[in-house]
Image (tube, rainbow, N blue to C red):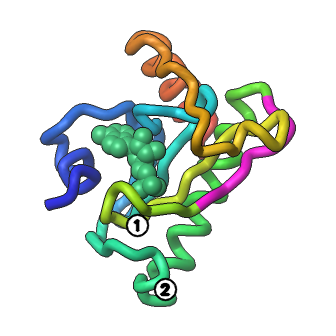
Amino acid sequence: MTVFSKIVAGEIPSYKVAEDDRYHAFLDINPLRKGHTLVIPKQETDYIFDLDDETIAGLQIFAKRVAKAIKAAIPCRKVGQAVLGLEVPHAHIHLVPLTTEGDMDFSHKIDAPEPAEMQRIADEIAKNFE
Ligand code: AMP
């Protein structure tokens, strides 16, 4: 079981942003910016481009809804999207609120906000999820 499947199962804690029967979104624990969110399929597949067409399309559509919620909740110019997958072998999309290009630099993470602040951010995004 991947660490992300454990999050879906509630076996390890996370700051949940949105969920349906097939997809799940939660805050990145080590964010690039406040509001940095990961969107995953519940189906456990390592490499995003190994997902079947229907699942990857659904993942992108779910991520679009999450991105709109982030944009409504966090001051930013746009929400950027990236896929790396070098660390956790469970397909995921990174959504990051952007003000400048440098906000998407994965070698420069911010200090994670305090748990109460992470929860507040997750709740704010969740409130705007449609
Ligand atoms: P990558 O697989 O290279 O796309 O990176 C995995 C991302 O998952 C990193 O940005 C980590 O900070 C994040 N991450 C790892 N474990 C957790 C966790 N338990 N909860 C939330 N985010 C996590």
**Residue at (31%, 74%) from the top-left corner?**
45
User: Residue 65 location, x and y as percent?
Assistant: 63, 54
Secondary element at tag 1: loop
User: Is 119 situated above or below 65?
Assistant: above
Secondary element at tag 2: helix
Q: Is mark 1 within 8 Å of ligand 1?
A: no
User: Residue 96 location, x and y as percent?
Assistant: 65, 42
**Residue 34 location, quadrant:** top right
User: Residue 119 location, x and y as percent?
Assistant: 43, 20
Q: Quadrant of the N terminus?
A: bottom left
Counting residues from the start of the chain, the first of labels 1 and 2 encountered is 2
**Residue at (39%, 37%) from the top-left corner?**
16
Stretch of the chain drawn in magenta: 76-82
Q: Residues within 10 Å of mark 2 (few under 14, many from 20)?
A: few
Q: Which residue is mark 1?
A: 91
User: Is 54 situated above or below 47?
Assistant: below
Q: Which residue appears farthest toward the bottom when viewing the image?
A: 53
- State ligand 1's quadrant: top left
44 horizontally vs 101: left or right:
left
- Magenta stretch: residue 113 in it? no
**Residue at (45%, 75%) from the top-left corner?**
48
**Residue 77 location, quadrant:** top right
Q: Which residue is mark 2?
A: 54
Amino acid type indicated by mark 1: Ala
Amino acid type indicated by mark 2: Glu
User: Is 103 situated above or below 47?
Assistant: above
11 horizontally vs 51: left or right:
left
